[in-house]
Image (spheres, helix red, strand yellow):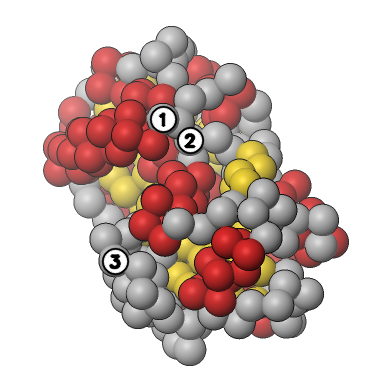
Amino acid sequence: MHRSVFLRSSVALAAAFAGRMPAARAADRLGAGPFTIVAPFAAGGPVDSLARLLAAGLASLYKQPAIVDNRPGASGNIGIGLVKRAKPDGHTLLVVPQGNLTINPTLMPRLPYSVSGDFEPVASMGRTANVIAVHPGVPATTLQALVALSRGRPGTLSYASPGVGSSLHLAGELLKERTGADLLHVAYKGSTLGLNDVLAGSVPIILSNLPVVLPYLRSDKLRALAVTDAVRSELLPDVPTLAEAGVQGVALSSWYGVLAPKGTPSAVVVRLADDVEAILQAPAAQNQLGMQGITPWVIKGRAFGELIAAETAMWAPIIERLGIQTN
C-alpha cells in the first residue's frame, strides 16, 4: 500500500509536469542519449519519488528518454557504486539521502566510495521533517508520556528505523540520551518493512520521514507525537516539535540530493544544477511534493559540497559519543 501511494503520485506528477517545462534548446543539450537516474533504495519512498521527478523533468527538458533505476541493497552502496563507475557525461545521476553522504563515511570505515573523491555534488533537491509516531494501541498521546511509559516498562518498548546509522536511528539515540527514555532500536532494510511491523502492532514506535507515514497519520492508523524539525510541519500543524515537547538540542530534518560521477565536466554540473532548480520550480512539482511532505530545497554545486562536508563533521563526534557501530 505504501509503495503504491508513492508510485501513483510519481506517475501523476510526471504527467502533470511533462507539459509545463520549456522546450529544449540545442545549446543546452548534454549530448545525445538517455538519462539514468539511480535510486539506491527500493521504490516507494522519498528517494524514489524525487528520482522520478528528476527523470520526468530531464526527459521534458532535453527530449531524451530518462529512466529511474532502483538498485537497493547494502545500505545504498550497490546503487551508489553503479554511479561511481558510470561514464562522467551527465547522463547517469544519483539521487541519495543525506545519511549516505554525511553519516556513513564515519559509520563505515570500509565504505566502498568516497563522497568527495568519487562524486561531483550537483544540487540538493528537497528536505522533509521526521516524525516520531506510535501505533494507536500505545497508551501515550504525548512524547513525555511515551518517555514515562518506557521508563515504567524497561526493555519492552522498541522503535523502528530504516537502518543502523540512518539519520533516524541517530535521532532516536539522541532522544534517548536527552530524555532517559528506555527504548530498543530495531533496524530495518529501509522504511517500508519497519512501517509494516508498526502498523501491525509488533513494533510500537517508528521514527520516519514524514512522506513515509503521512497517509497513515491521516487515516489514524498511526499517531504522531512530535516532529524532529525546528519548526512544525504545515501538514501536521497540531503536532509539536521536539523542543515544544520538552526535548532541547535535537532539531533534525532529512534532505536528499543529486550527485554525478567524478570527472563530470564542470559546465555539465552547472547545467544540471540549473535544471534541478528549474524542475523544482514547476508548480506541478511543488504541489505534488508538498502533498507528500517534501519541501523543494536547492543548494547548488560547491555550496552543496560544503554542506555535505559540514554535516559530515557535525555527525562524526555524535556517532562516536553514542557508540553507534554497524555489524
Q: Left or right? Give the position of 173 relative to 266.
A: right
CA distance separating discs 2 and 1: 11 Å
Residue 1 makes an appearance in the image = no
Other-residue count near label 2 (Cα within 10 Å), few / some / many at <14 / 14–19 / ≥20: many
Q: Residue at x 47, y 62 (%)?
A: 130
Above or below, 84 against 307 in this view is above
194 to the left or right of 109: right
- What label sits on residue 248 in the rendered view? 3
Counting from the top left corner in percent of width and height, residue 74 is at 61, 23
Closer to the camera in the image, 55 or 240: 240
Residue that appears at 56% across and 54% down: 182
Q: Which amino acid type is marked by label 1?
A: Gly
Amino acid marked by disc 3:
Gln
Q: Which mark is residue 158?
A: none
- Specify the quadrant that holds the C terminus: top right
Q: Residue at x 32, y 62 (%)?
A: 251
Disc number placed over residue 323 in the picture, else none: 1
Q: Amino acid at mark 2?
A: Gly
> Marks 3 and 1, Cα distance to the nearest angstrom?
21 Å
